[in-house]
């Protein structure tokens, strides 16, 4: 049996250190807004080359806090359009519509599965673009981004899947105006529960997000903004500090596994994921292939004990919650690539698997006809 992902195995690596970290927090008597969160924020900012880091409750909240922060600062207003790639986890869309902003669903590229910067559905109402570094691949176009910025359009990275990735020496999460990270347990760096973070170089956004996440307050019992409670726990921060120290190794292992898959899969009906661009490091959160008879391939692998997943089986604009939703728009020409990919993509196991397991899976895939 090769399960798609085995979190117990993932977290067995440094288990003694997690237990020590948990004990340190329990014995400290401080469980919210203490020294573990403060240290984790410093360490994550330094690991990503960002000036400011705010540790928060979830990746979805990180995205919402960035958008609400820009709204509080007058950079975004009700009804403004935010471009979001249609092939992403639903959270990217939910953050936008929850803030009263319009999500403009955009198409993606065939090989990279990421937002297609050549087909951005720009309109006079466009105020922000959210590139998603999907599956860990840096999604960026320096040329498009500078054109967008010259029009005052904000670039907010959804870096939930790409911690550890980089482009020409700059880490994802530090490329745009602000970025959101998720530490959902199955992410490359996963917490023991929910957690997330916001990164930015913008001091006023950082201050606003920090306040919003803490009841709109920076001084006890004085509330500047109508905020939320979106804080990261000390316990999660202490555990995440242990895991963050392992990030380079985790990224290296995933790159090794992805390269081995790409070298061994030779079935002519299988499309492999695009190789990372020159000068970039992919975080390989998922290794995603495409096949015209994806469901049969998935059944075949399962019958041989191999678990797979589909990320994602339904493009976000096709989800039931967005049917005739007043804050959801789709690119005028439709989203043919995203809709077609949803029928063909298949994610293979990539977390903590051995070379032998990859050989077994590649053999099975090559035998499938
Ligand atoms: C996981 C994920 C999120 C949301 O993160 P949570 O911590 O689960 O709220 C947002 N965007 C993408 C692309 C994700 O993969």
Image (cartoon, rainbow, N blue to C red):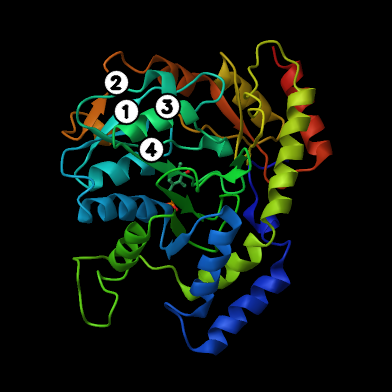
- Residue 168 is at least partly visible in this image: yes
Say which label, 1 or 3, has the lower sequence index.
1
Determine the residue positioned at 28% across, 55% down. Answer: 69
Residue 257 circle label: none
Residue 130 circle label: 4
Measured in 3D between alpha carbons, the distance from the residue under mark 1 to the one under mark 4, in whole angstroms, is 10 Å
Total marks in image: 4
Say which label, 4 or 2, has the lower sequence index.
4
Q: Check disc 1: other Cα within 10 Å, few if <14, some if 14-19, many if 20+.
A: many
Determine the residue positioned at 22% across, 51% down. Answer: 71
Discs 1, 2 touching: Cβ within 8 Å? yes
Residue 144 circle label: 3
Q: Could you tell me which secondary element the residue under label 4 belongs to?
A: loop
**Image quarter hosting the N terminus:** top right
Describe residue 202's horizontal placement relative to residue 266 as left or right.
left
Q: Could you tell me which secondary element the residue under label 2 belongs to?
A: loop
Tell which of 135 and 73 is nearer to you.
73
Tell which of 159 and 334 is nearer to you.
159
Describe residue 277's horizontal placement relative to residue 146 as left or right.
right
Say which label, 2 or 3, has the lower sequence index.
3
Residue 331 circle label: 2
236 lies above or below 23: above
Determine the residue positioned at 36% across, 18% down. Answer: 335
Say which label, 1 or 2, has the lower sequence index.
1
Q: Check disc 4: other Cα within 10 Å, few if <14, some if 14-19, many if 20+.
A: many
């Amino acid at each position: 049996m090769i399960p798609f992902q085995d979190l117990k195995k993932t977290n067995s690596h440094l288990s003694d250190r997690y237990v020590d970290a948990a004990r340190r927090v329990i014995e400290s008597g401080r469980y919210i807004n203490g020294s573990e969160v403060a240290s984790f924020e410093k360490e994550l900012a330094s690991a990503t080359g960002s000036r400011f880091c705010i540790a928060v409750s979830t990746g979805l909240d990180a995205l919402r806090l960035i958008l609400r922060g820009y709204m509080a600062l007058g950079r975004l207003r009700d009804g403004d359009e935010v471009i979001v790639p249609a092939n992403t986890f639903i959270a990217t869309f939910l953050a936008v519509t929850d803030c009263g902003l319009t999500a403009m669903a955009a198409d993606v590229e065939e090989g990279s599965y990421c937002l297609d910067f050549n087909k951005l559905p720009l309109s006079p109402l466009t105020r922000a673009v959210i590139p998603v570094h999907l599956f860990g691949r840096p999604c960026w176009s320096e040329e498009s981004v500078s054109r967008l910025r010259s029009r005052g359009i904000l670039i907010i990275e959804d870096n939930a899947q790409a911690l550890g990735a980089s482009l020409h020496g700059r880490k994802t999460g530090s490329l745009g105006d602000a970025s959101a990270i998720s530490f959902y347990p199955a992410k490359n760096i996963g917490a023991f529960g929910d957690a997330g973070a916001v990164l930015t170089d913008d001091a006023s956004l950082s201050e606003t997000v920090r306040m919003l996440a803490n009841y709109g307050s920076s001084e006890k019992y004085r509330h500047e903004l109508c905020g939320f409670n979106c804080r990261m726990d000390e316990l999660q921060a202490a555990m995440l500090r242990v895991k963050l120290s392992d990030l380079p190794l985790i990224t290296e292992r995933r790159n090794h596994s992805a390269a081995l898959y790409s070298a061994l899969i030779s079935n002519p009906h299988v499309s492999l994921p695009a190789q990372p661009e020159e000068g970039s490091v992919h975080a390989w959160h998922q290794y995603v292939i495409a096949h015209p008879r994806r469901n049969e391939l998935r059944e075949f692998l399962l019958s041989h004990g191999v678990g797979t997943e589909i990320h994602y089986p339904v493009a976000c604009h096709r989800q039931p919650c967005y049917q005739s939703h007043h804050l959801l728009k789709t690119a005028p020409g439709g989203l043919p690539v995203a809709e077609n990919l949803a029928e063909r993509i298949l994610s293979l196991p990539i977390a903590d698997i051995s070379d032998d397991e990859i050989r077994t899976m590649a053999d099975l895939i090559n035998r499938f006809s």
